[in-house]
Amino acid sequence: MIKRLLLVASTDKRLEKLVSTSRLTRGLVGRFVAGTTLADAVAVTRELQAQNIDVSLDLLGETVDDLAESAIATKAYIEAVRAIAENRLGATVSVKLSQLGIAVDPTVCAGHLDDLLQAAAEVEVGVEIDMEHSSVGPAELEAFRAALGEHPGTRVAMQAAMRRTPSDLESFTGVKPRIRLVKGAFLEPIEKALQERHEITAQYRYLSDYALANLPDPAFGTHDDACIDHVKASAERLGIGRRDFEFQMLHGVRRDVQRRLADEGYRIRIYLPYGTQWYPYLMRRMAERPANLLLFLRSLISG
């Protein structure tokens, strides 16, 4: 029930305005978001790399309403790619195709994605494509599939909660995709997505085994101890080294686990958001993990 309420709240514009302008939320935002500018994100990236933790930069913002906005977002992503190269950060960028206009004009979006991938290839920076709500998910997967031939190093997020994910993965019969496996953080109808936590976790474990056995350099986006332990055990059983896959986590979430995994020799990458449009992102993070909601409530109480 709490998860559903928070996911509904993530799309409430009046609540967004109220929370976004409150001084009481600044401390919490600072925990989960690098800052409002690309320079802020670069600075936090350096701090994390000093702890042997890699980064994927995420420009906050979601579905655009017109193509002018999508062009602005594409330019901002390319600026992030160039900043990564100029500062020798070794980071990647995570891109939401809804920001590049996939819901407005998929053809224009494909052009924006190609521009970004070309710019990233020129400076040898990796790109990861986020998988979003099912209203745009199939189109996003097809855009990734179309780009894969020329840019096989591109990674795409896949959601364990979605019923179609196993067949989607099996549909790649040529180039095997690099994926980031996540549980999923969107409010979806029951016919499209698993609803019960134990079902989603079971599918996450199944897909983890599939990715380790069949796909190149998989990434596992999870804060769930059971899922982390399952990936570790499966990799060991399959004879896969600790540097041949990576764990991915969110900035500010379970930082002790992030450091422990890095100390144990696993690759760990932090999804590092920056920008001013943090509200929907923050609401989904709280929906994913109740502990994040407790942090939010403590910040309100402490002022």
Image (cartoon, rainbow, N blue to C red):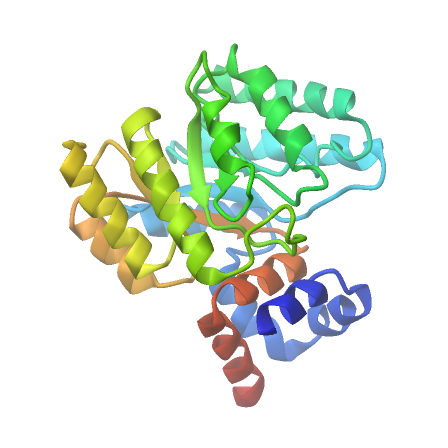
Total marks shown come to 0
- Residue placed most toward the observer, 226 or 106: 226
What residue sits 76% from the left and 25% below the top? 106
- Give residue 94's position: percent from left, percent from top: 53, 38
- Residue placed most toward the observer, 108 or 205: 205
Q: Is residue 127 visible?
A: no
Q: Is residue 260 visible?
A: yes
Q: Is residue 117 left or right of residue 89?
A: right
Residue 108 versus residue 150 in the image, above or below: below
What residue sits 48% from the left and 76% below the top? 295
- Give residue 101's position: percent from left, percent from top: 76, 33
Q: Is residue 77 left or right of residue 246?
A: right
- Give residue 75's position: percent from left, percent from top: 68, 30
Q: Quadrant for residue 237, please give it.
A: top left
- Give residue 138's position: percent from left, percent from top: 65, 32
The quadrant the N terminus occupies is bottom right
Residue 203 versus residue 28 in the image, above or below: above
What residue sits 60% from the left and 74% below the top? 25
